Amino acid sequence: MTAISLPTLSAVEVRVLGVLAEKQRTVPDTYPLTLNTLVAGCNQKTSREPVMEVSDAQAQQALDSLRAKSLIIESSGGRVPRYEHNIERVLQIPTPSAALLAVLMLRGPQTAGELRINCDRLHKFTDISAVEGFLRELAERPDGSLVVELPRQPGSRENRWAHLLCGAPPTPTEQHAAAGSRSNEAGDLAVLRSRVDALEARVAELHALIAALQPGQKR
């Protein structure tokens, strides 16, 4: 089968694909996964960056889209459908590369050293050089790069790697702008809450004043 050049996937599609690749190695007795088990894996609070809240409907939509791209296979046996990934066959990559890609999909950008540790349950790499070798293969894939080495961050000794399944990762400038935007939004929200608190306090004072005047009005 010829490897394909992937279209850009959504964040939920990437999370679903990553969970399927992870659970194949970590919980083989329950793999392929049901929708409920898959959603639980998508919404884990640990070993996930970012933490997400994926609904059943969102996961099913992602599964349907990934199935159309041949990236997952649905098993019809049993009372409920089960799903398994098809990454290695479709992308024509070996198991070690699929493990690296899965961990990048689930945990975001990481150094080669971090990837070696975080991949331990999916595939045991002998050393960091082995990790870097497979990362280079993924970055230089003839049908399109699947990972990219990011510019070194200030104060860091190692470069981080990121997957490209959602398109190019944001640049440090874009990340800074996004952080600034979130900070501004938080500041605006704080001001709004302060104004609401002041209005509520004023309304309470008016209610108290009205209550105090009522006996005199009756007289």
Image: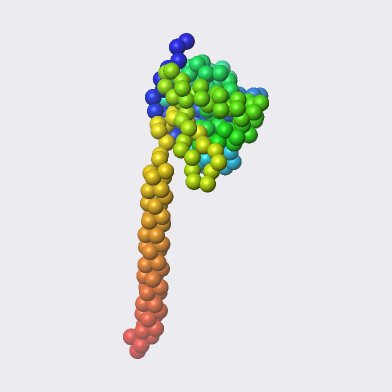
Toward the viewer: 194 or 122? Answer: 122
Q: Position of residue 129 (x, y in %)?
A: 60, 27
User: In the figure, residue 118 lies in which quadrant?
Assistant: top right
Q: Residue at x 49, y 23 (%)?
A: 138
Res 193 → quadrant: bottom left
**In this orientation, does residue 219 appear?**
yes
The residue under the point 37% across, 67% down is 195
Whether 108 is drawn above or below 198: the answer is above
Residue 85 falls left or right of residue 10: right
Residue 100 spot, x, y in % from top left:
56, 28
Number of marks? 0
User: Which of 57/48 is in front?
Assistant: 48
Residue at 52% across, 32% down: 104
Q: Quadrant of the C terminus?
A: bottom left
- Please tell me whether residue 192 is drawn above or below residue 154 in the rendered image: below
Q: How is the image coloured?
A: rainbow
Q: Farthest top residue? A: 1
Residue 167 x, y percent position in the rendering: 40, 31
